[in-house]
Amino acid sequence: MPRRPKKEIKIQNIVASASLEKDIPLIKLAEALPNTEYNPEQFPGLVMRIKEPKTSALIFSSGKIVCTGAKSMAKVKEAVKKIIQNIEKIKIKITVVPKVTVQNMVASGSIGMDLNLNMLAMELENTEYEPEQFPGLVYKLPGTRATFLLFSNGKIVCTGTRSEAKLRESVDLLITTLLKVNKK
């Protein structure tokens, strides 16, 4: 029985949303805080940059927020706490503990095996591969939300999953699929 390839996968970015369930005066927030950008003529949300954990948030006047840049759920929650602390500096009391929903995770790493992308493009469905334009093959893994970018050296990028468990499950399923195709 051949050994399973060694996989290494690391979350690079989590996009999460939450609601503070309170209207936020964005102009007042932008005037009070130096780490913000707000151009309502161009986009209805205020951008807030947080140094630690290094994240950015979009804050809308409805109290909805989208946080991006965190590499773990713990860091997402920490960033949301910092956003609330910043908003409370302009005397807006947030009384809810916002429910954080992951919208997307991006992870990268290696599956520890060389890949023949031309062969995979022929054998697998749901692929896009144009080597003259980009050296990676895009593969939508059936039955999952995961989309993979595969490179011939075994490096991968995965996007579309919403939890670490689903991410790991998708990578395992990808490896199983690739091993089956390689046996043909």
Image: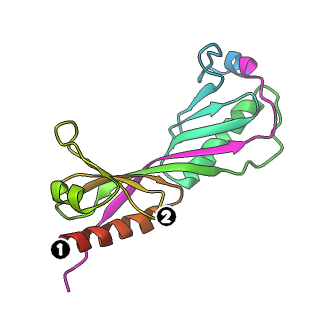
Q: Give the residue at the far top of this rendering.
A: 41
Of the residues under marks 1 and 2, which one precedes in the sequence? 2
Q: Is residue 143 left or right of residue 4?
A: right
Image quadrant containing the C terminus: bottom left
Secondary structure at badge 1 equals: loop
Q: Residue at (69%, 15%) from the top-left corner?
A: 31
Circle 1 Cα neighbour tier, 10 Å, few/some/many (<14 / 14–19 / ≥20): few
On the image, the x and y values in percent for residue 39 come to 62, 15
Secondary structure at badge 2 equals: helix
Tell me the CA gap for discs 1 and 2. Answer: 27 Å
Q: Which residue is mark 2?
A: 166
Q: Amino acid at mark 2?
A: Lys
Residue 126: assigned label: none
In the image, residue 104 sits, relative to residue 30, either above or below, namely below
> In front: mark 1 or mark 2?
1
Q: Residue at (19%, 55%) from the top-left corner?
A: 117
Is residue 34 within the magenta segment? no
Q: Which residue is mark 1?
A: 184
**Hey, which quadrant is residue 20 in on the image?**
top right
Q: Residue at (71%, 51%) from the top-left corner?
A: 99
Between residue 158 and residue 59, name the one nearer to us: 158
Q: Residue at (56%, 54%) from the top-left corner?
A: 73
Residue 5 shows up from this direction: no
Between residue 34 and residue 180, name the one nearer to us: 180
On the image, the x and y values in percent for residue 123 come to 23, 63
Residue 87 shows up from this direction: yes
Between residue 76 and residue 58, name the one nearer to us: 58
Q: Amino acid at mark 1?
A: Lys
Q: Is residue 97 left or right of residue 132?
A: right
In this picture, which residue range is highlighted in magenta?
A: 1-28
